[in-house]
Image: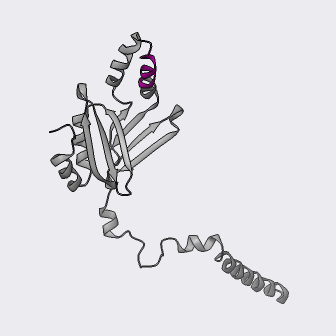
């Protein structure tokens, strides 16, 4: 035997619980209940997204410009005037860092590496280069927005340029191979 008063309390408790569950659905509980049930049908990833996979970024070179740029200025220290160019060349060795990867080129410079310039290969519309002694070279990349991106004294220049040309648009690579090196006659 259950008193009438207690049975009324039990139904009120059930109603309170139902109301509480409904109110919780308005808050954070709603997100949990909806998870996996987004617009557009099933929660399984589409086949095109599953098929696309990004390769990890491969670092080709990371370090300072070629050390050969310091040879002539260091020898010129024997003259009083040669101290300034030698100090500038050694400062570049200490403060400039190149990072050439399969996705981008980054030049970090300044005391403590505070200045950084970075480009991605699809932005390059033209490349011009000049070779230096000892297998080094300079590169200027012309970008879509009209800016120029310069790198001086790139070590292992021939191999580095081949790596970069594999990453850029095929039209840019073909144009470079036709007339990009300004030291060729």
Q: Is residue 56 left or right of residue 10?
A: left
Q: Nearer the viewer, residue 92 or 167?
A: 92
Residue 115 at x, y percent in the picture: 50, 40
Task: Determine the residue located farthest toward the top in the rendered image.
Answer: 78
Q: Nearer the viewer, residue 98 or 127?
A: 127
Which quadrant does the C terminus fall into?
Answer: top left
Magenta residues, start to end: 81-89
In the rendered image, residue 87 lying in the magenta stretch gets the answer: yes
Identify the residue shown where x is 42% and y is 22%: 85
Residue 177 at x, y percent in the picture: 17, 46
Identify the residue shown where x is 64% and y is 77%: 25
Give the overall secondary structure of the magenta segment: helix
Q: Nearer the viewer, residue 101 or 42?
A: 101
Q: Is residue 102 visible?
A: no
Q: Is residue 117 left or right of residue 181?
A: right
Q: Is residue 172 visible?
A: yes
Which quadrant does the N terminus fall into?
Answer: bottom right
Q: Is residue 182 above or below residue 95?
A: below
Residue 114 at x, y percent in the picture: 53, 38
Q: Quadrant of residue 7?
A: bottom right
Residue 110 at x, y percent in the picture: 50, 34
Q: How is the image coloured?
A: one colour
Identify the residue shown where x is 38% and y is 57%: 145
Q: Is residue 33 above or below residue 10?
A: above
Q: Is residue 6 above or below residue 88?
A: below
Q: Quadrant of residue 161?
A: top left
């Amino acid at each position: 035997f259950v008193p009438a008063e207690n049975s009324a309390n039990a139904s009120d408790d059930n109603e309170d619980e139902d109301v509480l569950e409904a109110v919780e659905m308005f808050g954070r509980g709603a997100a949990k209940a909806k998870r996996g049930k987004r617009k557009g049908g099933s929660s399984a990833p589409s086949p095109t997204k599953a098929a696309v996979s990004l390769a990890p970024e491969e670092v080709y070179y990371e370090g300072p410009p070629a050390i050969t740029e310091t040879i002539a200025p260091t020898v010129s220290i024997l003259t009083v005037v040669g101290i300034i160019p030698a100090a500038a060349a050694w400062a570049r060795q200490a403060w400039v860092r190149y990072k050439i990867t399969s996705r981008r080129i980054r030049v970090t410079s300044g005391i403590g590496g505070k200045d950084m310039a970075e480009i991605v290969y699809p932005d390059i519309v033209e490349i011009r280069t000049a070779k230096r002694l000892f297998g080094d070279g300079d590169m200027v990349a012309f970008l879509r927005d009209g800016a120029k991106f310069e790198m001086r004294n790139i070590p292992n220049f021939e191999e580095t340029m081949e790596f970069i040309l594999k990453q850029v648009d095929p039209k840019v690579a073909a144009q470079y191979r036709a007339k990009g090196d300004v030291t060729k006659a």
